[in-house]
Image: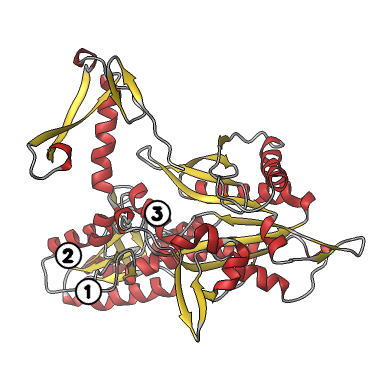
Amino acid sequence: MIRLSIYKQGEFEDLCRGPHVPALRFLHNFKLTRVAGAYLGGDEKAEMLTRIYGIAFADKESLKAHLHMMEEAKKRDHRKIGSEMELFMFNEEAGSGLPFWMPKGAKLRYKLETILHKAHLRREYQPVRGPEILKADMWRTSGHYACYGDNMYLTTIDEQEYGIKPMNCLGHILVFKQAQKSYRDLPLRYYEYGVVHRHEKSGVLHGLLRVREFTQDDAHIFCEPHQIASEVLEVVEFVDAVMKLFGFEYTMEIATKPEKAIGEDAVWELATQGLKDALDGNTLPYTIDEGGGAFYGPKIDIKITDAIGRKWQCGTIQVDFNLPERFDVEYVGEDNTRKKPVMIHRAILGSFERFIGILTEHYAGEFPFFLAPLQVIIIPISSSHVAYANSLKKALLYSDIDAEVYDKNDSLNKRVRNAEKQRVPYVVIIGDEEVANASVAIRDRRNKEQYNLTQDEFMVKLGKQLQKGKI
């Protein structure tokens, strides 16, 4: 179905939502942003026109705030910062939308994965892992083939069609079905850092924010119907803890049945009401996105606000009665009869790639200490200080703190400048006094301070900062 909006103003009609400004005198607070050429009617043989782009706001303060946000967005572009800090890269010879993680970026990602891994275990999730390719018949049964097939990569092996997974749901279903389950086993929570592939069009690819291969912090909860509300609330609490750790504010939106969907309306209404009851019962605010649900179930979308006021879609919580029915998933109930569990799909970050892209722009590369890919750079003033610098580095590494020694044959000022470009939390200068007293001269980038500590005091300080990365 194609929907068109027509805006009318007097005798003027346009295929857009409008409104148009009736006269230029209403544009008191505006700024022209760029100009470009365009052929009349899109015909390259026709007259060249000049297209003028601009923005306008109701008041001067709003215009100024928007321009500031756009300037900040340029400074914070994760692609630029990622290149400067050597976090990730793309290679067109390998293919578009396929990120490569460089050593520092891989460290950052590992730290984020570890924080989430420990948090899952504390919340009684169980780790699982499924294959990245399954027979196409599996995707036909699930409805992905019909409803999501255009976004999938399909191949043929031994005259059998296979699909590279765009989602992790089916692997978790098969793990659940491997052995008989009882109501005493529920709720059963599986989680996986699952690599998925989706055929995104080249025009929408954008750094880490839109890629073709990414890793979801995915989980599926199998529970009884009466456990929906408590499980959804547990996930919301998990989301809240993660967002507070990184300083994000967030809102929630319930997305309802889309036009392209599987399952009966009654099942959808039951699942949607389950989400509403969970949030309403705890007076948690939300809005409604009509028709924005996944094809197999309604969902709660988590939308976060970053440091300069932009909103990002990240986590999601989906209630699904359809896939357990389609795959004949069962458990033995308290009355000794076989019943269908409810399946709750959930991701908190959404994907590690996208979330790291958002984090990079949120912090402008100034990651908190517990997440920073490189936490300490040690700069010995001369060759006589290198041995102490290396012993300090070793002590830091054994305490799970990433450190490097900058002892190249460059001037001290150049090595300090290079360290600053890495946006490292601490730059440590080592000279005669520090070697003699087993101390460190610290440049604290986050607090913009300089001070001296003994090595032991410094180690204790950093150990406490590592503890802040717990959920």
**Alpha carbon separation for disc pair 3 and 2:** 22 Å
In the image shown, does 47 or 258 lie closer to the viewer? 47
Judged left or right of residue 260, residue 430 is left
The vertical placement of 450 against 121, above or below, is above
Q: Residue furthest bottom?
A: 158
**Alpha carbon separation for disc pair 2 and 1:** 15 Å
Give the residue at mark 3. 368
What residue appears at the point 17 percent right and 76 percent down from the top-left corner? Answer: 383
The vertical placement of 208 against 251, above or below, is below
What residue appears at the point 24 percent right and 46 percent down from the top-left corner? Answer: 75
The vertical placement of 296 against 282, above or below, is below
Q: Residues within 10 Å of mark 2 (few under 14, many from 20)?
A: many
What residue appears at the point 25 percent right and 27 percent down from the top-left corner? Answer: 64
Tell me if I can see residue 316 in this picture.
yes
Q: Amino acid at mark 2?
A: Arg
Single out the mark in the foreground, 1 or 3. Answer: 3
What residue appears at the point 10 percent right and 45 percent down from the top-left corner? Answer: 44
Tell me if I can see residue 238 in this picture.
no
Q: Amino acid at mark 3?
A: Pro
Where residue 405 sits: x, y (%)? Answer: 26, 72
Pointer 3 with pointer 2, Cβ within 8 A: no
Q: Secondary structure at mark 3?
A: loop
Where residue 153 sits: x, y (%)? Answer: 44, 69
Give the residue at mark 1. 385
In the image shown, does 61 or 366 lie closer to the viewer? 61
Single out the mark in the foreground, 3 or 2. Answer: 3
Q: Residues within 10 Å of mark 1 (few under 14, many from 20)?
A: some
Where residue 164 sits: x, y (%)? Answer: 48, 72
Q: Residue furthest right?
A: 335
Judged left or right of residue 75, residue 280 is right
Q: Earlier in the sequence, mark 2 or mark 1?
A: 1
